[in-house]
Image (tube, helix red, strand yellow):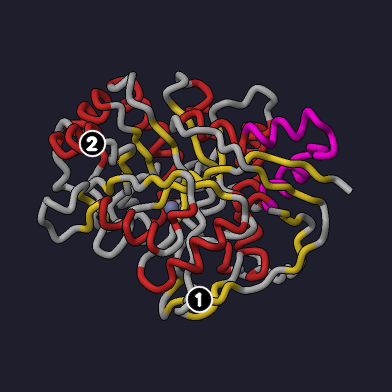
Amino acid sequence: MISFTLPKWYDLHTHFRQGDVLPAYIQAHLDMGCAGALAMPNTKPPTAIVFDKDKSEYWSIERYMRDLRNAGGSKFQELVVPLYLTIDTTPDMIIEGAKSGILKACKYYPPHGTTGAEFGAPIDKYIENGIFTAMEVAGVILCIHGEEHGLSPDKYFDRSTNAEEIFYSTHMPIIRDKFPKLKIVCEHITTKTAVDFVSESSDKVAATVTPQHLIYTIGDLIQGLKYHLFCLPVLKHCEDRNALQAAVTAPDNTKFFAGTDSAPHSIKATKCGCAAGCFTGGIAPQLYAMSFELAGVDLSDQKSQDIFKNFLCLNGANFYNLPIPQENFTLVKQASPLKALKTSNGEVMPLPLGLGMDILPWAIQN
Ligand SMILES: [Zn+2]
């Protein structure tokens, strides 16, 4: 039986939501060997100021961190909440926040691009109004949801281009070249175009990759309209998935790391459509192991296990300057049953269970 031990890891892109559901979602992350997480700020209202003292309609990072810690997040070694960039974000907020140590990252959402993204402004705004300059000076990391917003349906998912490819071939090179010292995380990338952009850029540019984008393609979603697979950016084509697999399984990978974008929805199908996001809390290392095997990696081999460790445990911690945890957890190639997660707001389906798969080939021993 294959079994290997890894340092605990950081999920560097996740959604814990807010309120009574928090303890269940945080516990699911603790159960999968997480020593910490980057908790996304698309709360309601968005977490778009740093300090409690700055009175605002928005939530502060201090407030959201307090809620997360009180709901079990104090068991994490590290917790990062990025600041949601809005039209009201000022360079002074960035400088002051960074000085205090509370502000480590900011999150760009394309306006109306995904769940809770309606407070974002077009990316050019932050290039012009001094926000990216302040972040570059203060050493604050930019987390980017890289999709062009406001496209007509024919451009959104065209045969040869899509919202992510347009964003990475138009805006991203400009941002990278204008702010060469700005550290950028290209989040939940889904296309070969984005992989190539990250690979060709300096070591200031890195990327998170989700389990679902490493395992599935758009065909898996469309065949039977398996809406549990609907997330944003939407799944892409075989060539894209292969490029992602090649990037994360490369022996010299230092730029691509784990960020699940786990996004729990107790109601996934809505009256007209479907909420975007796949829930992978509790099972992400197992899914990442599956994706490595799907890419042809033999995880019984020590060298392959080291490559997996780089992706899951080391690269992201290094990019965010977080300490590598001393505690370990163990991944075992052993069938484990999947269950829906019970929360105060109903059950949440882990992604594979939503696809009809009730046994995973990997298990975790904490
Ligand atoms: Zn997300």
Task: In this rendered view, identify the residue nearer to me: 42 or 319.
Answer: 319
Say whether residue 230 is visible: no
Q: Residues within 10 Å of mark 2 (few under 14, many from 20)?
A: few
Which residue corresponds to the image point at 64% horizontal and 46% vertical from the top-left?
Answer: 214
Which residue corresponds to the image point at 61% horizontal and 58% vertical from the top-left?
Answer: 31
As drawn, is 336 to the left or to the right of 56? right
Q: Quadrant of residue 43?
A: bottom left
> Residue lying farthest right?
1
As drawn, is 164 to the left or to the right of 226? left
Q: Secondary structure at mark 2?
A: helix
Q: Where 143 falls versus 270 (above or below)?
A: above
Please identify, in this view, whether the residue under mark 1 or under mark 2 is nearer the observer. Answer: 2
Which residue corresponds to the image point at 28% horizontal and 36% vertical from the top-left?
Answer: 101
Q: How many marks?
A: 2
Identify the disc placed on residue 343: 1
Identify the disc placed on residue 73: none
Q: Secondary structure at mark 1?
A: strand
As drawn, is 324 to the left or to the right of 106? right
Spot occupied by residue 56 in the image (x, y as percentages of width and height): 12, 57
- The residue type indicated by label 1 comes to Thr
Spot occupied by residue 211 in the image (x, y as percentages of width and height): 61, 50
Task: In this rendered view, identify the residue nearer to me: 17 or 72.
Answer: 72
Q: CA distance from mark 1 to mark 2?
A: 35 Å
Main secondary structure found in the magenta portion: helix
Q: Which residues are magenta?
A: 286-310
Q: Where 165 falls versus 362 (above or below)?
A: above
Q: Residues within 10 Å of mark 1 (few under 14, many from 20)?
A: some
- The residue type indicated by label 2 comes to Ser
Identify the disc placed on residue 100: 2
Q: Quadrant of residue 96?
A: top left
